[in-house]
Amino acid sequence: MENKISIFLKGFLMGVCDLIPGISGGTIAFITGIYTRLIDAVKNFSPKLIYDIFTYPIHKKRDRLKEDIKKLDLLFLLVLMLGISSALLTGSRIIKFLLEDYYAYTLSFFIGL
């Protein structure tokens, strides 16, 4: 199991690449080796499973809750999404600054990609 810092950094890289035209975050997920795990985690989401997770405190089925959270790979998804969100917030500010102050260079860079 990958550590949380590694997953966060891979998510951050995915988020940065989502900001840049022509580069896909999914491609970065594939290159960094988390694509299959990401697809498996997303594939396991279902309305019933989400409903069950939010109603577990009522039914007091902690073992089943832990099992479903593990099935969804929820910790992995949360850390990955935190990395992507951080990159989108940080990267968008940087790109805004570059477009405002260095428009020609930034545009040339993106066209060159």
Image (tube, rainbow, N blue to C red):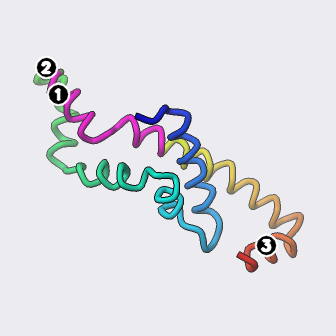
Residue found 55% across the figure and 55% down from its top: 14
Main SS of the magenta segment? helix
Residue 68 position in % (x across, y down)? 20, 35
| Range of magenta residues | 63-80
Three-letter amino acid code of the residue under disc 1: Tyr
Give whichever of discs 1 and 3 has the lower sequence position. 1
The residue beneath circle 3 is 109
Residue found 73% across the figure and 53% down from its top: 93
**Quadrant (top left, top right, bottom left, bottom right) of the C terminus:** bottom right
The residue beneath circle 1 is 56
Dot 1 falls on a residue whose secondary structure is helix
Q: Quadrant of residue 20?
A: bottom right
Badge 3, how many Cα within 10 Å: few under 14, some, many 20+? few
Residue found 53% across the figure and 59% down from its top: 28
Badge 2, how many Cα within 10 Å: few under 14, some, many 20+? few
Q: Nearer the viewer, residue 34 or 51?
A: 34
Dot 2 falls on a residue whose secondary structure is loop
Horizontal relation, residue 57 to residue 104: left or right: left
Q: Is residue 72 magenta?
A: yes
Three-letter amino acid code of the residue under disc 3: Phe
Residue 13 position in % (x across, y down)? 60, 52
Q: Nearer the viewer, mark 1 or mark 3?
A: 3
Residue 1 position in % (x across, y down)? 40, 34
What is the C-alpha distance between the residues marked 3 and 2? 55 Å
Badge 1, how many Cα within 10 Å: few under 14, some, many 20+? some
